Amino acid sequence: MRDGFSWGVSTSAYQVEGAVREDGRGLSIWDTFAHEPDRIADGSTGDVACDHYHRYGQDVALMADLGVSAYRFSIAWPRIQPTGAGAANPAGVAFYDRLVDELLGRGIDPVATLFHWDLPQDLQDAGGWTARDTAYRFADYADVLGAALADRVRLWITLNEPVVHLIFGHLWGMHAPGLHLFEDPFPVVHHQLLAHGLAAGALRGHGPTPIGIANNYSPAWPVGPDGRRDSATAADRAAAQVYATLQNWLFTDPILRGEYPAGLDAFPGAAALETLVRDGDLAAIGAPLDALGVNYYNPTGVGAPSHDTPLPFDIRLVEGYPRTYFGWPVVPDGLREMLVSLRERYGAALPPVYVTESGCAYADVPAATGSIVDSERIGYLDGHVGAVRQAAAGGVDVRGYFVWSLLDNFEWGEGFTKRFGLVHVDFATQVRTPKASYAWYRDLIAADRAGRG
Ligand code: FCB
């Protein structure tokens, strides 16, 4: 990545690309899941999404006008290896070649995520992340990408939010692959971590491009049943610690400390780690990393389990804050708190941090004139940029901030009902309309650049 602070925007393949049957792309678990009845709130799929596969030139032009210095996108594994194994599909690789060249031609650093949840369906059929072999397949895939793109990608991100893929995809079943592995979740934990470690090793073989992972972080706030922090009991506080172990440390301690966090015996199935972790695994997982991606949206209210639940905590809504259209509390200071907690926990082992996702959903209804005045989003982003600046002033080495997202897109189980973009997308016509927040972000980037000389 270039010196200085990177201002960026993020997207992911299944959420924006569409063109799911083109140029030899194989099926992913999201193609399967979204086409099953009653999985997606509005019955939609990512078949077309933002049609970014065909309109990437226009989208890169939007980024250039915005003035971002970096674009974080993800690569669809089934475009590169349609079945998740074997030789690269040249037409799939060619798309990312074009995209990366277009970005570089506009002076934008390509930040490529290898896996943003769209596992090739054939690998799922062979066990998905419950199978150790998936980690080896992922390392092969990383090797293919390294050979094709390492000369031009400026930052690799191995996995996006393995904890969300675990919880939403493999416990609650609200995301693909729609599983409920409450009794035996640790294979999905360890094999994702191993995949990260092996892929990072494979990418190292292709040159000095820095490597990171993007984790989802959320301060665990003990709250009482009324969602207030001041009504939390000792049991709520204990439950919040357990939750923090899962949400924040489970996918970070092995990477930055080379060991699993203490306290995992609170979770069903943790004993399996004894056999899952083989010689050499933790060394691969804990090899030095160049960057930590922090995806932050809100703190999580946590209480002691109050009913029959397979998990050792209850998730409670944090009260006393405004909410986004998603219902998520707006707490910019939670981002500062999280960044400082990471520095406190990992000290010198914490690599440079990039906020790889930060953003919010609002209704974003166009006015009669067609303009979209998303003042709430501007307030949200302004607060979160301020939190990053405070964390940096407090000594956290934060090197970049990426807004989720450039475009309104396919928001997983919510379909097209939640708009996160700086740019509005009319999904009937594919017309892109920059929102007021786009102009705000453009001005912020320009002012920051002028100030830094
Ligand atoms: C994150 C995901 C991203 C997007 C945002 C809103 O958890 O990484 O794809 O859905 O949430």
Image: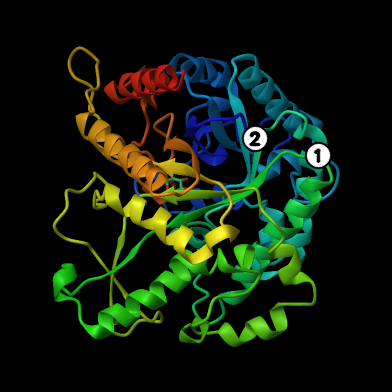
Q: Which numbered tag is attached to residue 21?
A: 2
Pinpoint residue 169: horizontal percent, then vertical percent: 50, 61
SS label for mark 2: loop
Q: Which numbered tag is attached to residue 207?
A: 1
Position of the N terminus by quadrant: top right
Vertical comparison of 233 with 284: above or below: below
The residue lying at 64 percent from left, 38 percent from top is 155
Pinpoint residue 141: horizontal percent, then vertical percent: 77, 48
The residue lying at 27 percent from left, 85 percent from top is 235
For the residue carrying disc 1, how many other residues have a C-alpha within 10 Å: few (<14), some (14-19), or many (20+)? Answer: few
Pinpoint residue 381: horizontal percent, then vertical percent: 31, 36
SS label for mark 1: loop
Horizontal arrangement in the rendering, residue 372 relative to residue 164 (left or right)? left
Q: Quadrant of residue 96?
A: top right
Instruction: Find out if the beta carbon at label 1 lies less than 8 Å from the nearest ligand 1 atom.
Output: no
Instruction: Mark 2 or mark 1: name the one nearer the start of the chain.
Output: 2
